[in-house]
Every structure is written in C-alpha cells, then in structure tokens.
Image: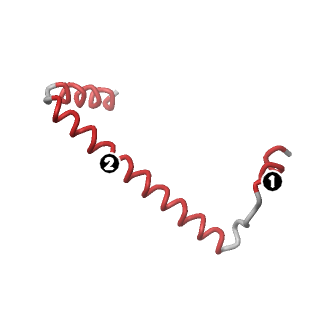
C-alpha cells in the first residue's frame, strides 16, 4: 500500500510542475529506463557467455530450437 501512496504522491508532485518541466522529466525517465535496459541486457549477455564458456550451453540452429520447443 505504501508504494501506491508514493506513486500517487509523485503524480501529484508532477502535476504541480510546468509543462516544460514535465516534458523534461519524461525525457530523463526515458533515458534512465534505456540505460537500465542496456545494463540488464549486457549482464544477460555476459552471463550467457560465461555459461557457454563453462559448457553450460551450446550453439543451436533455429530449426533445432523449434524442434525442442515443439517436441
């Protein structure tokens, strides 16, 4: 319930900003989200490379993967 109150408080605070400041805030949030996604993807790639190097996975063709999924 605390999160909803905090979210509501943030929305109330944003409503008090000028349109220009709201637009600037949107751009900042978009950049932060993109950076978060880039970091997460880089971590996933790094983990996959480590698993591959450790022999935990192997290269596979799309056809092989579809056969595995549909089997």
Task: Please give the label number shown on residue 27.
Answer: none
**Residue placed farthest to the bottom in the image?**
53
Percent coordinates x, y for residue 35 in the rendering: 37, 53
Left or right, residue 4 beside residue 58: left
Query: Where does label 1 land, which residue?
Result: 63
Q: Secondary structure at mark 1?
A: helix
Percent coordinates x, y for residue 60 in the rendering: 76, 62
Is 44 placed above or below 56 here?
A: above
Query: Where does label 2 land, which residue?
Result: 31
**Residue situated in front as seen by the camera: 9 or 64:** 64
Percent coordinates x, y for residue 55 in the rendering: 70, 72
> Residue at coordinates 69% horizontally, 67% vertically from top-left?
56
Left or right, residue 43 beside residue 6: right
Is 28 placed above or below 8 here?
A: below
**Residue situated in front as seen by the camera: 15 or 23:** 23
Colour scheme used in the picture? Answer: secondary structure
Few, some or many residues within 10 Å of mark 1 (<14, 14–19, 20+): few
Percent coordinates x, y for residue 3 in the rendering: 33, 32
Q: Quadrant of residue 53?
A: bottom right
> Residue at coordinates 17% horizontally, 29% vertically from top-left?
19
Q: Secondary structure at mark 2?
A: helix
> Residue at coordinates 59% horizontally, 69% vertically from top-left?
49
**Residue placed farthest to the right in the image?**
71
């Amino acid at each position: 319930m605390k999160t909803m109150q905090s979210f509501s408080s943030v929305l109330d605070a944003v409503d008090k900003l000028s349109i220009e400041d709201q637009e600037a805030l949107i751009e900042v949030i978009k950049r932060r989200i993109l950076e978060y996604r880039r970091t997460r993807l880089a971590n996933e790639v790094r983990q996959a490379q480590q698993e591959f190097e450790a022999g935990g996975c192997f290269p596979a063709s799309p056809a092989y993967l579809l056969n595995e999924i549909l089997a």
